[in-house]
Amino acid sequence: MQSALFLYAADRARHSHFRRVVLYLNPMNRAVSAFLAKHNFIRHIDIDSVIDALLYDMNSGLHGQKVYQDMIRTYSNPPENPASDKSVIVIDAGGTNFRSCLVSFNEQGKASIDFLEKTKMPGVAKALSRSDFFDEIASNIEHLKDKAESIGFCFSYPMEITDDGDGILIRFTKEVNAPEVVGCRIGETLKKTLEARGWKKLRRVTLLNDTVAALLAGAATPDAGKKYSSYIGLILGTGLNAAYIQPKMPDVKDFAKQIVVCESGKFGAIVCSDFDDALDAKTLSPGKYRTEKQCSGGYLGDVAFEALKAAAEEGLFGKACAKRILALSALSLVEADAFLHAPYSTNASLGALAAESASDEDYDRIFQLLDAVMERSARYAAAILAACVIQSGEGKNASRPVCILCNGSTYFKTHMLARRVHGYLEEALTKERDLYWEIISRENDITLGAAIAGLIEE
């Protein structure tokens, strides 16, 4: 932990140097850069420093030390053979939505999805007791009653995975409010709840994280003629997390090669700005998930809003524009991203506000502030992926790169984010470390990965 913090102390020293040279910037950028520096916002974090800090934390966690990331063992690997002639019920409990369906594999291993339904994630709209939480899940999947013997349950929250495929909830994230569920065996409790409601055929409930589902989907759906040396799953949507395949560790007792879930959003050896601290104080988990709160879609709009408000209060904008910004009650990532994609469009709230009150200089400063928040997210995402590639020990052969399956609307839709991640990885992995990788996406990836997990023990 001390080494990780030392790396960031060095990074902050570089940041102090940045403050000294700010006067040499383009005059249009100077005020924004000075404002960000004043509030301890590092505009361009050093990715290599973050990678080193992450690797230190990951290795320490794998060796049983107390660290930021949980480094959760899954006791599983991608199956060697494709599923065929089988069906499995799939549940996907994500940050906002709750999805359920039946996935069937034909004799050739091709998957079909039926009876798909989507509703809200239990515990987001209101606080729930343990029994109410599982009753809501049971009600949400009543349409799938006895359609298969197994359930693949993608439960996208920190869990301790047991060797029988169940999951014990460590804590909720993404503002889910059901504290009595913490500590219980999710699969076992759901199975009992369903049986009490008359389910007859259910034999097994397998728990997995959405990052594991993404990883499994990447492993199960290679393009024709492709071979990969390893697999990574990244989620950058409402939340942030990654999973990778950790090789056997001879110096760690009973540690075989297996998928490891990092809980990357918990990483805390990072510099937090005044805007991050202001947002953090308003969440259900102050002081925790500091990387997730700087990167994921559940928080990026709020961080940008804190920055805009502070800039308006401190005179970075003209009086008319500042007044309109201070009158805003909130700013979503969708609205912030709409401005970045089309600053002079009036179809979104921030663009309409600027059209009525902003000067050309105001437009540019709003854009720079929002872009700084999004660009920082891309740098952290790239650092997390680079650390996972390095930790996997693979990617040394250009013809067999590491396959990275990325999932999440924040990653794919946020202005310039995916493009920047790709560029930062090219520099940090390929040019600096001679490691090879490929980012892919797949339709229905989480659903497919959860189905595969539900059948691994069959």
Image (cartoon, rainbow, N blue to C red):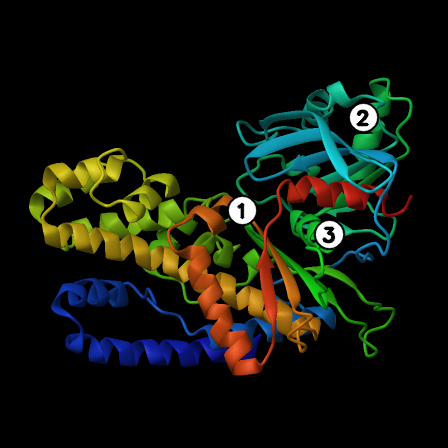
Q: Residue at x 23, y 66 (%)?
A: 33
**What kind of element bears circle 1?**
loop
Q: Residues within 10 Å of mark 2 (few under 14, many from 20)?
A: some
Residue kind at label 1, given as amino acid type? Gly
**What kind of element bears circle 2?**
helix
Distance Cα–Cα, label 2 vs label 1: 31 Å
Disc 1 marks which residue? 408
Please say whether residue 268 is visible from this viewpoint: yes
Does residue 369 appear to the left or right of 216 in the view shown? Answer: left
Residue kind at label 2, given as amino acid type? Thr
Q: Residue at x 61, y 39 (%)?
A: 94
Mark whose residue sits in front, 2 or 1:
1
Q: Mark 3 and mark 1 in contact (Cβ < 8 Å)?
A: no
**What kind of element bears circle 3?**
helix
Q: Residues within 10 Å of mark 1 (few under 14, many from 20)?
A: some
The disc, 2 or 3, on the residue closer to the chain's N-terminal end is: 2
On-image quarter of the N terminus:
bottom right
The disc, 1 or 3, on the residue closer to the chain's N-terminal end is: 3
Disc 3 marks which residue? 216
Please say whether residue 183 is visible from this viewpoint: no
In the displayed structure, 273 sits above or below 436; it is above
Does residue 185 appear to the left or right of 204 in the view shown? Answer: left
**Which one is nearer the viewer's eye here, 250 or 16?**
250
Which numbered disc covers residue 193?
2
Residue kind at label 3, given as amino acid type? Leu
Q: Residue at x 59, y 64 (%)?
A: 438
**Which one is nearer the viewer's eye here, 61 or 453?**
453
Position of residue 428 measured from the top left corner of the image (x, y, whole percent): 50, 75
Position of residue 106 measured from the top left corner of the image (x, y, whole percent): 83, 36
Position of residue 322 measured from the top left corner of the image (x, y, whole percent): 14, 45
